[in-house]
Image (cartoon, grey):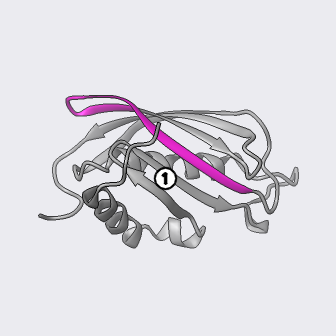
Amino acid sequence: MMSTTTPMSQAVADAMYERDHVAHALAIKIEQVGLGSATVSMVVRRDMVNGHDICHGGYMALLCDSAFAYACNSYNQVTVASGFSIELLAPAKLGDTLVAVAVEQSLRGRSGVYDVKLTNQNGDVIALFRGKSARIQGEVVKQ
């Protein structure tokens, strides 16, 4: 279940997005952000399709990693990935709208675990991603 957007989680997402050149270049959209959760989307473009005429897996991982980043930074404490894994379950095709939904599974001390489900516009599961986070010093939005 997604958590409710808070003013701080939205401010953090807005600040991160403003500085995220990759998100702008790929036209990634933040659909929702809450404490420990985030939903982002992206349309598969021609320049994202590989030699098999399907979306390159790296772009799918990147979208999941973006949702993970917004979810784990939503508490306004600078948090980075310490690792992730992804299972690519089905191809994404040119023109597909991919939606990555990140949900916090565990947050203890400075470490967190987040699961991300990647689906297409039909709700078909395309990939499952698990990210591990590490909190470092600082705040995303200075208070």
Task: Identify the main secondary structure in magenta.
Answer: strand
Q: Which residue is rendered at x = 29% and y = 37% of the image? A: 134
Going by the numbered disc 1, the residue's amino acid type is Ser
Viewer-side residue, 53 vs 66: 66
Based on the picture, tell me whether residue 112 belongs to the magenta stretch: yes
Q: Which residue is rendered at x = 41% and y = 67% of the image? A: 17
User: In screen coordinates, is 115 left or right of 126?
Assistant: left
Total number of numbered labels? 1
Residue underneath mark 1: 66
Viewer-side residue, 42 vs 19: 42
Based on the picture, tell me whether residue 138 belongs to the magenta stretch: no
SS class, disc 1:
helix
Q: Which residue is rendered at x = 64% and y = 48% of the image? A: 60
At which x and y percent is residue 20? Answer: 43, 67
User: Does 90 sit above or below residue 143?
Assistant: above
Q: Which residue is rendered at x = 16% and y = 48% of the image? A: 137
Residue 13: name its quadrant: bottom left
User: In screen coordinates, is 60 left or right of 47?
Assistant: left
Residue 36: name its quadrant: top left
Viewer-side residue, 35 vs 84: 35
